[in-house]
Amino acid sequence: MTKKIKSLFITSDSSSMAGVGPCLADALEYLDYKLISPVVICPWESAGVPTILPRLEALDVPIYIRNLGGWLISPSLWGITHLFRFVYTFKERVWALASLIEREEIDLVYTNGLPCIDGAIAALLTRRPHIWHLHEAINNNNDLRAYIPSWLVQYLVGRLSNTIIVNSSFLAREFRVAGQLKPLKVIHNGVNISEFLPLPVSAEVVSVRKELGLSADILLILAVGTANPRKGYDFLIKVAENVLSKQSGVCFLIAGSELEHYSTYLHDLVVDLGLEQTFRFLGPRQDIPRLMKACDIFVHCARQETFGRVLIEAMAAGKPVISTCCGGPEEIVSDGETGYLVPIDSLEVIAERVDALLRSVQLRNDFGTAGQRRVFNYFSVESYASSIQKIILNISNCRNDL
């Protein structure tokens, strides 16, 4: 009988809104448990933040909540206080992980996300193979800040990994430019397509508008993701002003957590432009599939994105998408077939694309149908999990052959 590969999965972020957390949950839900036996470690999360824990608990796998140190963190936390805490608790954190690896008889360690280095060090100390699955860029990423140069971060990722998984060719190019010689496997994120398929007559279309106090014929333009400067929501608000000056019966929605200072700026900008009734901030939501099904157009105005999971979710829901050319989206969206790709911060271009889709139900339907077909062919969660599973089994088999 084939021995199960007992694998420790560590995620740097268990939020249900960020792409990192849901990507891990997707993989774990579709792995073959006859071949792989998972143990999961999640970090502490702030109270009130929706997480992937309910999804993981439904899988009935061992779950540990641990203090995981971030060697790359939000700029708002970066500084001497955090650095001191990171260094002071480093030995305790790593030895706790190493003890867990030995106690649980872990065969392989898999780190989901760049910000956490603890699992990689613990794998080195216990002589276990380590897979590092990267979702984040280092260069030009205003969401993460390191205490060491980016080239050194990339070097250490390579030294501490048997295999590196990246979520796009865009991210792979960044690591190859840095001279990364370890194997880089590109695995595009997947989506559970059945979760986003709209009903023939979607109840969500009516219920979402009723919830927001909008009439049934209002057209909804949706964006999803944490409100931070990299997502370009300040630019989206200006796009909304341009579009709404030409068309009525339209409402823009943003679903996602909000960073305090940037959020204040966004809310003030909406007021200054007189868009309070036509531009809504929904905050963090647990019903993203419902919102995707209810919207008419999905817009992604990011200034940098290594992949863009929300785009394949919107396409799975049969919605036309408009995205900036900011990295990963160019590998998702077929321009002029499933939606539009536009230059970053190109106000007139993106406003014209939104206006064209608002004016044509046929165009929205054609793009939506083509988008669903593309997700079926290239971005299914089954294919995503299968690709990760093959890498885990291959590394484990190679190690057993030594």
Image (spheres, rainbow, N blue to C red):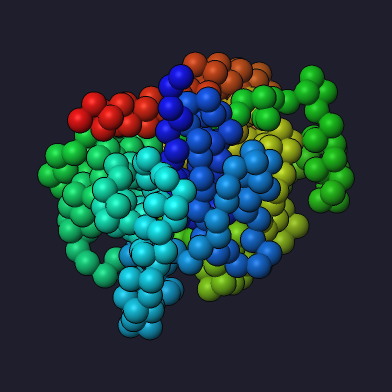
- Residue 196: percent from the left, percent from the top? 67, 30
Q: Residue at x 34, y 79 (%)?
A: 88
Which residue lies at the image location 42% right of the left edge and 33% below the top edge?
A: 5
Question: Residue 104: horizontal and vertical position, in percent?
Answer: 46, 48
Quarter holding the C terminus? Answer: top left
Residue 362 location, quadrant: top right
- Judge whether 156 appears above or below 82 on screen: above
Q: Dividing the picture into quarters, in which one does residue 368 lie?
A: top right
The picture quadrant where one finds residue 115 is bottom left
Residue 157 locus on image (x, y percent): 25, 50
Tag count: 0
Q: Tell me: residue 114, above or below residue 60.
A: below
Residue at 22%, 34% (x, y): give it.
183
Residue 356 drawn at (x, y percent): 58, 30
Can residue 82 be seen here? yes
Toward the viewer: 374 or 158?
158
| 211 horizontally vs 321: left or right | right
**Residue 224 in view of the camera:** no
